[in-house]
Image (cartoon, helix red, strand yellow):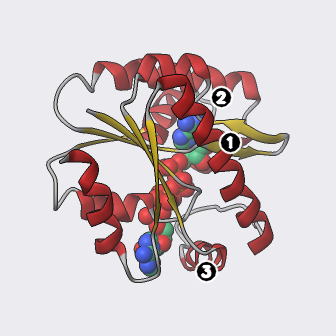
Amino acid sequence: MLCIVLGIPGVGKTTVLDALSEIVAIKRLNFGDYMFKEAENRGLVTNRDEMRKLPRQLQIELQETAARHIHEDSTVGNVVVDTHASIKTPQGYMPGLPEQVLRALNPDAFVLIECDPQDIYNRRNRDSSRSRDPDSVKDIEEHQMMNRAFSAVYADLTNSTVLIVRNEEGKVKETAETISKIFK
Ligand code: AP5
């Protein structure tokens, strides 16, 4: 089965998937890693936080290349793709999974990880390893709302489901337990 995990930067996708992989045998593929490898090879960026500021057409090309490679790497077992429902670019929200990307990935299920916008704001501020956008709590709230809209479209286009899971402060294990039920 191929499950796509979505959530805005700093909501805790990577942390929750670390916990999920201790509960269920999954192969994890990070969409941003695939995009970054290609972008770096092409000399377009030097860190992953620069990718969302690239011209839209270039980001689309990177998405399509990533989707092709992920498809090749996800033929057996339970595969979880860690990515974004929407990307906040300087021009506005861009779909993380445009139709041609969805068709290449052919997912069975989506999981949308959310939490209190104030917690995301705090988590981003605690993480000095990344160059996060200076979003306010209101901006984070809006981005989470937009992600619900994008996710509903993705589920419709692929005849699949969207499970919305809250990653409450200090409850990583509980969040992972909820997601694990998808694989049973
Ligand atoms: P990506 O690699 O996905 O980066 P990101 O979204 O910034 O994700 P992070 O890994 O930084 O955040 P996270 O949600 O995983 O949170 P984390 O677990 O670290 O994407 C990089 C780039 O690739 C994007 O910016 C974009 O340009 C591009 N990209 C990717 N997919 C794309 C697509 N489909 N189309 C176009 N571009 C795409 O946790 C954050 C912090 O919170 C940590 O300190 C953690 O310890 C803490 N934390 C987590 N959960 C909890 C909890 N329950 N309680 C307390 N603390 C918690």
Q: How many marks?
A: 3
Q: Is mark 2 within 8 Å of ligand 1?
A: yes
Q: Which badge, 1 or 3, is on the more N-terminal residue?
A: 1
Q: Is residue 94 left or right of residue 90?
A: left
Mark 2 neighbour class, 10 Å CA radius: few under 14, some 14 to 19, many 20 or more? some
Tell which circle, 3 or 2, labels the residue nearer the N-terminal end: 2
Badge nearest the viewer, 3 or 2: 3
Compared to residue 38, the image places residue 45 above or below, namely below
Asked which quadrant contains residue 3, the reply is: top left
Residue under the point 55% across and 79% down: 126
What residue type is disc 3 on? Asn
Q: Residue 148 in the image: state x and y as whole percent.
A: 63, 49
* Marks 1 and 3 close (CB-CB < 8 Å): no
Q: CA distance from mark 1 to mark 2?
A: 7 Å
Viewer-closest of 34 and 172? 172
Q: Decide if residue 98 is in sight here.
A: yes
Disc 1 residue lies near ligand 1 with CB under 8 A: yes
Tag shown at residue 43:
none
Q: Earlier in the sequence, mark 1 or mark 2?
A: 1
Q: Which residue is at the front of the view, 111 or 92? A: 111
Q: Position of residue 114 (x, y in %)?
A: 54, 63
